[in-house]
Amino acid sequence: MPRTAKLTDLDAVRSIISQLSFFGGVTDAQLATICRRLELWILEAGEVVFKTGDEPRYVYIVKSGKIDLQLAEKSMIIHKHDLQVGECCGEASLMSMHKHTTTAIAAVDSEVMVLSRNALIGLEHEDIHLFALLMMNLARELARRLYLTDGMLIDATAKKSSGH
């Protein structure tokens, strides 16, 4: 279980989250609203952030360190991506309300800022315009990922049919 701590370096937090497409187009005041809702998790290398099949509860943003995303199928583990500082995960599962399809593990000692589902839903009542902007940003990011995934599927199918 990760340790939690207060976010104290708000300038660093703002500089990280302002670079994420999920938070694109937000004003400084809206960014401050988001920062107030973030929690900080401190993870040791090898610590599990979430596992395949877990219920989604957070959006995870890497503040320091590195998080390894893995896909597991039976006895095969596929390295999907190393999340670096300023990258996030969990938002697709959170919004689709489907269990996580990947496992996230701290590759090194890391700090992860988390935005809970409840905090996100609270924005709907506090600032509907911010909530709508975040949902639009999320839809755009998921569309980009779908486009990339379609390209990978086409490439893999082409390689398989050509015998490579």
Image: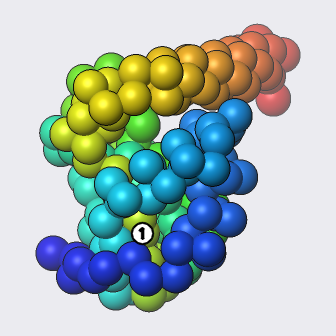
The vertical placement of 163 against 42, above or below, is above
Q: Where is residue 13 in the image (x, y as percent from the top left)?
A: 56, 68
Identify the residue shown where x is 32% and y is 25%.
Answer: 124
- Residue 147 occupies quadrant: top right
Element type at mark 1: strand
- Residue 141 occupies quadrant: top right
Identify the residue shown where x is 38% and y is 47%.
Answer: 59
Q: Is residue 13 left or right of residue 54?
A: right
Image coloring type: rainbow
Q: Number of callouts in the render?
A: 1
Q: Is residue 129 visible?
A: yes
Which quadrant is the N terminus positioned in? bottom left
Q: Position of residue 44 (x, y in %)?
A: 34, 87
Q: Which of 130 and 93 is in front in this view?
A: 130
Identify the residue shown where x is 26% and y is 43%.
Answer: 119
The vertical placement of 92 against 58, above or below, is above
Q: Can residue 104 be seen in this view?
A: no
Q: Is residue 147 left or right of residue 121?
A: right
Q: Where is residue 57 in the image (x, y as percent from the top left)?
A: 22, 44
